Each structure stands twice: as C-alpha cells, then as structure tokens.
Image (cartoon, rainbow, N blue to C red):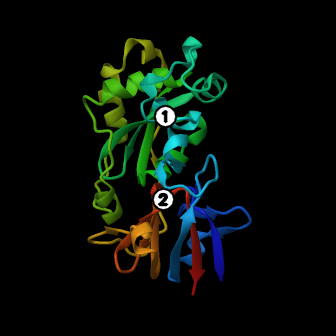
Amino acid sequence: MTYQGVLTKMETEFFSPIQYYLIFKNDFLNMNQLLNKNITIQFVKYQCLNCGLDKPIFRQGFDKQCFYDVAKAGDWIMRPELSTAHLDKEDRDLEYEKKVQLQPHIVYLANSSNVKVGVTRKSQVPTRWIDQGAHEAIEIVEVPNRYLAGITELALKDYVGDKTNWRKMLKNDIEDENLVEWRDRLKQYIPDEAAAYFIESNTETNLEFPVIKYPEKPKSLNIKKEQQYSGKLVGIKGQYLIFEDETVFNIRANEGLVVNIFIN
C-alpha cells in the first residue's frame, strides 16, 4: 500500500494504549495497526501549511514569510505570557487571537523525561500530554485566558522544569512522581492574579503508549537529507515513530513536508 500527503501532527485518541492517526487530505492511517510492519518514508517536496506553496519549511510547518505573518505563529503561541487579547490588543489578527486566547486554559505538570510545567487550552487535555510523551500528568490551575496561564507558568519555571528531554522520554528512562505532592508544593508560587484558580483536589492522569520496544540510543531521522528511509515500526510515543534499528522520526517537527509512505 502507498499513501501520499503533507505531514501534520498525528491525531490521537485517549485509550490504553493511545491510538494514533496520520491524517492526509484524502486518506488516513491508523498507525497502531502498522506496528511490527516495515514502512518506507520518502520525501517528495514541501507544502507550507498556510500558503500551500513548495517553499522550504522554516518553523511549525510554515515557510519563512508565512511564519512571520500568520496569527497561528505569533510569539504568544510559545510564550503565552505575551498574550494580549484580554486587553483587546492585536498582535497579528485580533479576531483569531481572541478566539484562542480568551478560552479556559490549563497550567499542568507532566512527567515525560522529568516533571515539567506547561500550558494548554482546556480543550487540548489530554492531547497536549500525549504529544509530549508524558506517562503521567495533572492539572494545577484552570484560568479563563491564556495570559493568566502564561504568567503562572512563568512563575513556576523558577521551581520546576519546562522542557522535555526527548532522548530520555523515548528511551523510557523515567521515574514515577507523586504529582499531587508536586502540585501542592508549587501552590505557594502561583501569582496572586491566578491564585483563586488553583485546583485543590484532583488526581493524576496516567497514559500508556503503543511501544513494543524502546530504543537504547535513539537517533533522529532527517528525511530531507536522507530522502528515503525504511524500517520496522516498533513504537509510537509523543509525536515520534520508533523503529527497530533505533531510528526515530518526529512527525510534528516535519510538518509541511509531503511524503510517500509505503507499507510492506
């Protein structure tokens, strides 16, 4: 079977284990069903997720011009404390920014390679945790807009990490943590503006990923450089495909690339 399409992050369903789907314009693949199968990935061209042109991808699936123009790539995406829609102040497109920023947001703790703090829209729980490869997570604050979530995350970064070590996550070199204790310990550092939104009583969520074999020394596939790769799929975690030879392929980091996928 052969499939062709532009890569976007895999869609997921919260089951045990997580179900993964690679969505193309006219087709989709249930990636869980491809475990233990040989897959060939072949780079075809670029296709910017905004303009659709065959121009080198710069970041987040966009070519350079689109990245600096489109509302979906504003600085507040990566730095939510820069959100200004609650002030009726536009960055690139106020209508879009209000739609995204002025909705409930969650500040959470997730344990993927280590305990980290993060921000996501409430509607993206637990999708965000799945995308990060977290095996456990807990909500600590629910606020009405992205700005409040951003300043809360910024304050907590002084006491807990905010990055995932992708190699450690993929090796499954992790330890279980008591995230309820972490939540309670960090409460005192929540900014006054968000203190009333602290979630007093909840439990952590556990996630199971469809992995047959974890790599000991994961090596990242650069499909643009290699042009083509073949291997047996033995796992999926976060947004990574894991192959038997310990090659790993980050789907999200390759958004905007058109590929052929051959299933042997």
Image quadrant where residue 157 sits: top left
Asked if residue 24 shows in the view, the reply is: yes
In the displayed structure image, the side of residue 215 where residue 42 appears, left or right: right
Tell me the crowding category of disc 2: few under 14, some 14 to 19, or many 20 or more residues within 10 angstroms, Cα based.
Answer: many
Write the residue at 28% across / 61% down.
173
Q: Against 154, is 78 above or below?
A: below
Q: Amino acid at mark 1?
A: Ile
Q: Against 109, is 243 above or below?
A: below
Q: CA distance from mark 1 to mark 2?
A: 18 Å
Q: Secondary structure at mark 2?
A: helix
Asked if residue 198 shows in the view, the reply is: no
In the displayed structure image, the side of residue 145 where residue 154 appears, left or right: left
N-terminal-most mark, 1 or 2: 1
Image quadrant where residue 119 sits: top left
In the displayed structure image, the side of residue 35 where residue 178 appears, left or right: left
Residue 144 is tagged as: none
Q: Position of residue 68 (x, y in %)?
A: 50, 36
Which quadrant holds the C terminus?
A: bottom right
Q: Position of residue 7 (x, y in %)?
A: 57, 61
User: Exactly how many numbered labels are in the figure?
Assistant: 2
Camera-side residue of 163 and 64: 64
The residue positioned farthest toward the right in the image shown: 26
- Residue annotated with mark 1: 77
Write the residue at 38% across / 75% down.
213
Residue 254 is tagged as: 2
Q: Position of residue 108 (x, y in %)?
A: 43, 36
Camera-side residue of 225 and 15: 225
Q: Amino acid at mark 2?
A: Asn
The residue positioned farthest toward the bottom in the image shown: 264
